[in-house]
Structure formats: structure tokens, C-alpha cells
């Protein structure tokens, strides 16, 4: 097994912008712990940054403060900074080629949002034949309401984790993942 840690969209938009992540509590410290453990164990780290395709977008507008990586993520080492415009980290990017060139067969999912970019990237990885480890407490989301209904952040997060565990990934805590590296 050769792993890479994906740190998906840990950008200011989720802290000081329009989409403050609220669940689970402590997701950022867990993401940082996973990054530190990956570096300490020689596991490549891929920082993923989302950018809206619309120059007038209210969120994730390239060059805006919300688009920037969270300062704690930005200051940590990473092997690749991947720019994406859609929820999946594989879609219209060089991620798959980069992973294959390095013989990586297992992806570790961390970041935001659980039900959007993390879920989509995990499914894309599974469809491409990668094994996936999904960090339950190093991913996160917020509550949503729209014309289809409303869901709490906890319900949404849990539903994605249960679905991921059904087929696409091994769901584990950051502590369990770090323990598996020893």
C-alpha cells in the first residue's frame, strides 16, 4: 500500500467566509495532525484548492481572501498544490497522472465539505481503482436548507460517512489512521 493524503479545499471560505464549517468540532486540528503525520511518515501530501469559474463569484473567487488556503495548511509542506473548478479533485486536473507516476494506490481523504468535494473525490478515486481511507473527523460540513428540505451538519456528515463505508472507502478517525502508520 502506497498512500497519498489529500487535503481538500481547506480554504478561508470555510472559516472567515460565507460557508463556516461547523461539524464535526475539531476538524481543522485533525486535518493538521494528519498532514504532520503524513510528512513524518514520508506520505505525499496533496493540497487541493477550489476556484470558482465565475470571476464575479461570491465564494471561492480566485485571488480573494476566501480562496486562499487556511494559513495553517498553507505553511505546512505539501508535494502538490492542485487547482480545481469542480467538486471532484480528479475532474479536469492532473491528479490521477501524478498519483500513478508515483505508484500511489491508496488515497486518504481529508478536508471540506464532506458531502461535496470529499465525497465526490472519494467516489472518483474508487471508480479509478484506488483504495480510499476517509477521515471521519478530518472532514467537515455545515447545515443546509433549500427547496428540497433541510439537514443538520451532523446528519449530513453521518449520512456521507455511512454511504462511504458501504462501498467506496474505509472510514476511520484521524487517530486510527495515524495509529495504522506505526
Image (cartoon, rainbow, N blue to C red):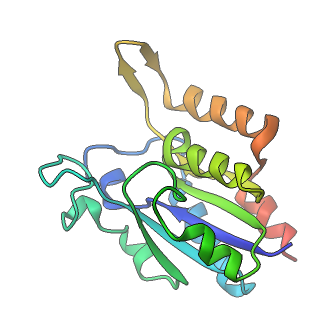
Residue at the (46%, 48%) spot, across then down: 87
Q: Position of residue 109 (x, y in %)?
A: 64, 58
Left or right of 16? Residue 112 is right
Q: Quadrant of residue 19?
A: top left
Q: Quadrant of residue 129?
A: bottom right
Q: Residue at x 70, y 63 (%)?
A: 107
Above or below: residue 10 compared with residue 149: below
Relative side of 23 to 175, left or right: left
Residue 153 location (% of width, % of height): 50, 31
Q: Residue at the location (51% across, 80% down)?
A: 80
**Badge count:** 0
Using the image, determine if residue 70 lies above or below residue 117: below
Q: Position of residue 79 (x, y in %)?
A: 55, 84
Which x, y percent locates residue 118? 56, 49
Residue 43 appears in which quarter of the rendering? bottom right
Q: Is residue 178 above or below residue 133?
A: below
Please tell me which residue is depicted at 24% across the width and 49% down the height of the picture.
59
Viewer-nearest residue: 62 or 182: 62
Name the residue at the left extreme: 56
Amino acid at each position: 500500500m502506497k498512500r497519498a493524503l489529500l487535503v481538500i479545499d481547506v480554504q478561508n471560505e470555510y472559516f472567515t467566509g460565507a460557508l463556516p464549517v461547523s461539524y464535526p468540532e475539531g476538524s481543522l486540528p485533525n486535518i493538521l495532525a494528519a498532514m504532520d503525520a503524513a510528512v513524518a511518515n514520508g506520505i505525499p501530501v496533496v493540497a487541493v484548492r477550489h476556484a470558482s469559474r465565475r470571476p464575479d463569484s461570491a465564494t471561492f473567487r480566485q485571488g480573494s481572501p476566501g480562496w486562499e488556503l487556511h494559513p495553517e495548511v498553507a505553511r505546512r509542506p505539501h508535494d502538490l498544490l492542485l487547482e480545481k473548478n469542480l467538486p471532484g479533485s480528479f475532474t479536469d486536473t492532473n491528479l490521477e497522472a501524478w498519483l500513478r507516476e508515483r505508484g500511489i494506490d491508496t488515497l486518504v481523504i481529508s478536508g471540506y465539505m464532506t458531502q461535496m468535494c470529499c465525497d465526490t473525490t472519494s467516489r472518483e478515486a474508487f471508480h479509478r481503482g484506488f483504495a480510499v481511507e476517509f477521515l471521519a473527523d478530518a472532514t467537515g460540513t455545515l447545515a443546509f436548507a433549500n427547496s428540497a428540505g433541510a439537514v443538520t451538519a451532523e446528519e449530513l456528515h453521518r449520512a456521507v460517512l455511512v454511504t462511504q463505508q458501504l462501498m467506496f472507502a474505509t472510514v476511520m478517525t484521524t487517530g486510527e489512521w495515524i495509529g495504522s502508520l506505526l
